[in-house]
Amino acid sequence: MSDAVHLLIPFAGVAGGSCAEAMQRLDLPHLEKLLARLAPEAADEGEATTLTLPHERVLARECGLSAPDGQLPWAAWQVQQGGRETGDEAWAWLTPCHWRVGADHIAMTHPQELQLSAGESRALLDAMQPYFTEDGLAVEYDAPTLWLARGEMFRNLPAASLDRAIGRHVDAWLPRTEAARPVRRLQQEMQMLLYTHPINEARTLGGLPPVNSFWVSGTGALPASHRPAPPAGLAVTHYLRDAALLDDAAAWAAAWHQLDNQECTRLLQAADRGDAVRLTLAGERNARTWSSASQGLWRRVSNLFSRPAALPVLQSL
């Protein structure tokens, strides 16, 4: 971890769809000035098939967390950051969601499309509680599309980030390990329970998608006697997330221009003042970081006459 001002931008680059086409036309002058001013650090390289997204890997390192792919204990981390003790218990995020069934696949819609109210979410959780309890799970409401769960089922369960599955075929992201069998069974049981639930019948009549499953992510227990926390200088911006997941090219490009004019400008001003700054851009495969710490005199001078294009950088993510 570092005392530098560190800006982390998830979904800075996208691999396909209309957002990838919009990426070709982005004009990001402040980002390009930053790339010219800063020196690259070692890249975090991965694949688009990892359960954990690149920006999550970066954030975990900044918070002092380390775990195998798909087992960063984000739910337990949230509970601890909220002032509660987690002990050695394993936690997970449960996200009520809608799986759209097609002829040959099942796709996950964005949870925001549910427009799920707190009352609906609590009522559905109440209906599901006996099944969770039977499997030794304690589940509590946190937000309409977020429930916190704890239980041994989540201790060694690799689970894909919710953002890996949104807008995609869920079959590719469902856990397949032996430890995941209870989760898969619960998902099947909940699909049958929710199919005729009065809340869903009312939602369908009102033109809203029914809640017909849940997604498990953020699984695991925090290391013993360890209280991870993000460094004071770290800022994670989520301007691009929803537009990228919905493949809304216009919204994604507009969010990038806002980021360039605001966050990138502020970071550039900090660098101009001589402050230590870092910038991390993360996409679906890789994350790349630049910092002011390792710049030598020759690089600072040569950067005055160069301005790397943003597009190849974004495409490399």
Image: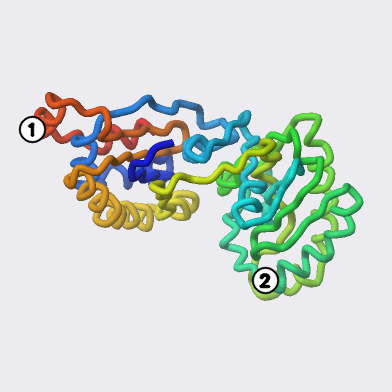
Q: Amino acid at mark 1?
A: Phe
The structure residue drawn at horizontal position 27% and vertical position 57%, both measured from the top left corner, is 262
Real-space Cα separation, disc 1 to disc 2, in angstroms: 55 Å
| Label annotation for residue 305 | 1
Earlier-in-chain disc, 1 versus 2: 2
Where on the picture, by quarter, is residue 133?
A: bottom right
Report the number of numbered marks: 2
Residue 171 visible in the snapshot: no
The image shows residue 41 at horizontal and vertical percentages of 34, 27
Residue 88 visible in the snapshot: yes
The way the protein has been coloured in the rendering is: rainbow
Quadrant, the N terminus: top left
The structure residue drawn at horizontal position 35% and vertical position 33%, both measured from the top left corner, is 289
Quadrant, the C terminus: top left
Q: Which residue is mark 2?
A: 118
The image shows residue 118 at horizontal and vertical percentages of 67, 71
The structure residue drawn at horizontal position 65% and vertical position 65%, both measured from the top left corner, is 144
Q: Amino acid at mark 2?
A: Ala
The structure residue drawn at horizontal position 43% and vertical position 38%, both measured from the top left corner, is 283
